[in-house]
Amino acid sequence: MTEHSHDTRPRRPLREVVSNIDRDILHLLLRRHNLLARMHNSKGFLDPAEEKALRESWEAAVSRVSRDARLSGRFFSLMQEVEFLPRPSAQRDEGEGDEGGQAAGAERRQAFNLAPALRPVRVVMPAPLACRTTRAWLMLAAASGQALRIEPCLMNDPIVDCVKALNQLGAGLTREECGVAARETSPAGAPDKVLHVGDSAWNFFLLLGHYLGRPSRAKFTGETGLKLADFSAVRRFLPSLGARLVHVVPKSDGLPARLECSGILPDVVTPPADAPAELAEGILLAAPFYERPLTLDLSAHPRQRMILARVLPILRAADADISVLEGRVRVTPGPLRLPARPRLPLEPELAVFLLALPLVLSGETRLDGDWPQWPEAQAVWELLQALGL
């Protein structure tokens, strides 16, 4: 008589199996990241030919299992840009192994544990200056070729990337210890170049507005955020301005993208409701350098108040020839007179964190600067007061 043996061992829950697979994927991504680092050239970048070969191989492999453009495009971009924690020389206790399969005593990745002391805060400092306003003045300096100096100013990635891009156009911008200086140069042109705008859509729209006013073409690249961004509304709107935006990656709505401009603009431009407010701001800042007067009709745009509040004070301080009537802004080209040291409002998105510290820790925060008269900034001011500050 034969007996059939039955396996009575309990099966692992499927969630545990999936969790183990997820950890295996992370280990493979980490291994891929380390191999890519070994492939970098002397400047710390991956050679474009190598990246193209990797992308083609990935898309070919994906096509055999999926038709999802997110897997073939976005997932590859994320794998290229993903960052991991550094590898400190912390040693584990002898006899322990980590969940990555490392032996006892091997280096392991770990995050920092930052726990500030809970005591009353006392902050007295100049307020951080508005990041976008800083870049708007740098754009005007580059387009006019005039000299100015902004200090103290933030020296974050968006401003650094903006300075580099404007210098590619022929500007004379220099980053210094406490600010940015623009020396007198010839007005910036619109060369046919590859311009890297970092991870800031505002940088992209500033340069886009600059190129729209003249026959030109260029290619724009950016970091992961802009690669995954949706610029389809911009693509649909630009033909009314005699321009065309073509995305380089198939089925993508983000960067990299090629721009072709005829330089022939209509007398009146009416951005649709889905057009980004930042694009309207970029056009207004570039309009003083166009060949013909331009009227930007924002009367039906949902973010009209914010656009006008952020841009009009800058243009007026630069002595631009503008007139405003019921949401319609008319800009007449002409020479600007930029102040040598423009006065900038503070950056509310950064200031609000400092001003909210006394709410949690008690104490006092005092920032020296002008609070901007933007609708969003005023709403933040009212919120802070409503919280009891």
Image (cartoon, grey):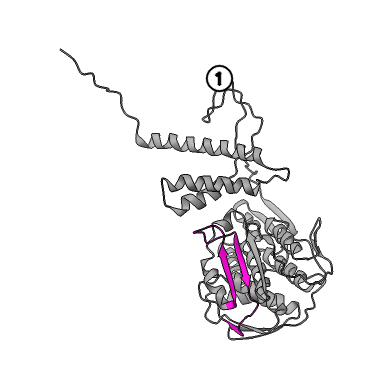
Residue 342, percent from left and from top: 78, 71
Q: Nearer the viewer, residue 318 or 216?
A: 216
Q: Is residue 43 above or below residue 387?
A: above
- At a point 58% along the width and 71% down the height, the residue shown is 244
In this rendering, position of residue 136 left or right of residue 1: right
Q: What is the count of numbered marks?
A: 1
Of 368 and 10, the residue lying toward us: 10
Is residue 257 rendered magenta in the image? yes
Instruction: Specify few, some or many for label 1: CA neighbours under 10 Å numbering under 14, 14-19, or 20 or more.
Output: few
Q: Where residue 314 appears, x then y in whole percent?
A: 71, 75
Q: Which residue is mark 1?
A: 95
Amino acid found under the numbered disc labelled 1: Gly
Quadrant in the picture for residue 3? top left
Identify the magenta region. Answer: 241-269
- 295 is within the stretch colored magenta: no
Q: Secondary structure at mark 1?
A: loop
Image x and y of residue 345, in percent = 71, 68
Q: Is residue 176 above or below residue 311?
A: above
Q: Position of residue 341 (x, y in %)?
A: 81, 69
On the question of residue 373 being in view, the answer is: no
The correct choice, above or below, for 276 with respect to 174 in the image is: below
